[in-house]
Image: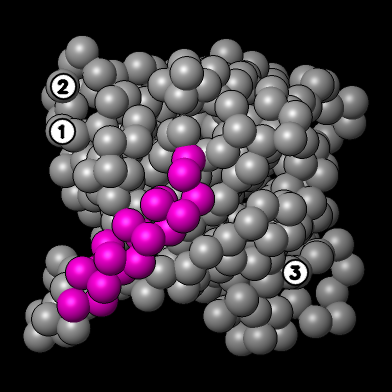
Amino acid sequence: MKRAIVTTGGTGGHIFPALAVAAELKAMHPGVEILFVGGEGPEGDLARRAGVSFRGLAVRGVLGRGLKAVPAMLRMAWSLVTALGIVRDFRPQVVAGFGGYAGFCPVLAAWMLRVPTAVHEQNSVPGVTNRFLGRVVDKVMVTYPDETHAFPASKVLVTGNPVRPEIAGYVETEPSRVVPKRVLVLGGSQGARAVNRLMVTAWPRLAAEGVELWHQTGSADYESFSQHYRGQAGVRVEPFITDMAGAYAWADLVIGRAGASTLAELACMGKPSLLVPFPHATHDHQRVNASWLEREGAAVVIDEKDLTADLLAGTILGLLGDQNKLLAMGRAARAQAKPDAAGVIARELTRLAA
């Protein structure tokens, strides 16, 4: 393979799997040119930081925007024209989309130009972009079995969800501390305000029990929530954690949403978790995602509407006080891991490009 396009945008849950596959393609095909085509979100900076060339599209979501859908549709049309130009100029042998509106136009443009195409769906309930593209692309790769029958069965390949190389390559170790008390709080790359609010309220009770905390607030919430921890020992607060492998390795218990990338990382790292699915996710897909780990005994799931600071603190302390349960949950998580997901996808893209 000499040239390939990966395309997506918006959130880390779409972007990191695409970058993981790009890294695998580079390792598999020395000298291959990878172009990341995305939108106006964080994907540009993240791609360049990973050493991947980037081209941006002025694309916005259309559904659920009311009157704003009209200019969004015009931007989508212009982005398709731009994507056609990018595909013609770059001449990729394959184009792989990883969901989101930013990934729609490049995959459609490639299909129109008869370039081999594929999509990867991270979530248990597919998004509208991949539902449409799944009808026309050559291959549909999925994290979870397609129980909704959203895609033609003949096209579907269950691959798992690609994770960053440093997480995929993590060597499982079990905690050596007799009394585990380290909690990592995540809200995805953009934070989770409800979880942040409950955690700062629960923190005094946790601190009194000797719990150590590493809290990713998201950039929008960092200033308002970090002040609640100022001057207190045993707590680290960041808007965004760059060294996620290090953060997971440090933690005995992870609190977070239930995005597909987070769940894949928890599995690869073998970490027990308390999951609070984002209640407004499309088709409630985070709740469905979380159920995969919950039914395997790897996670405790609490709906946001039922969660209080007291329940949060009590659940955390109950789990931290039962090391055998934590170890069992970690092993159950690890049993669900697919650390070679990026490799499986890269090999399939290589086959399509041949």
Q: For this view, does 181 lie left or right of residue 4?
A: right
Tell me the CA gap for discs 3 and 2: 45 Å
Front residue (pair 81, 169)? 81
Tell me the CA gap for discs 1 and 2: 7 Å
Span of residues in magenta = 74-92
Q: For this view, does 254 lie left or right of residue 173?
A: left
Residue 335: quadrant of the picture = top right
Residue 202: quadrant of the picture = bottom right
Q: Is residue 105 above or below residue 233?
A: above
Which secondary structure, mark 2?
A: loop
Instruction: Report if the CB atoms under discs 3 and 1 are less than 8 Å apart.
Output: no
Q: Which mark is residue 152?
A: 2
Q: Residue at x 70, y 79 (%)?
A: 226
Which secondary structure, mark 3?
A: strand
Q: Is residue 77 magenta?
A: yes
Q: In the rendered image, which residue does mark 3 sit on? A: 237
Instruction: Report if the CB atoms under discs 1 and 2 are less than 8 Å apart.
Output: yes
Point out the image quarter for the N terminus: top right
Front residue (pair 69, 221)? 69
Q: Is residue 267 visible?
A: no
Q: Is residue 327 above or below residue 188?
A: above
Which secondary structure, mark 1?
A: loop
Q: Which mark is residue 250?
A: none
Q: Is residue 77 visible?
A: yes
Q: In the rendered image, which residue does mark 1 sit on? A: 135
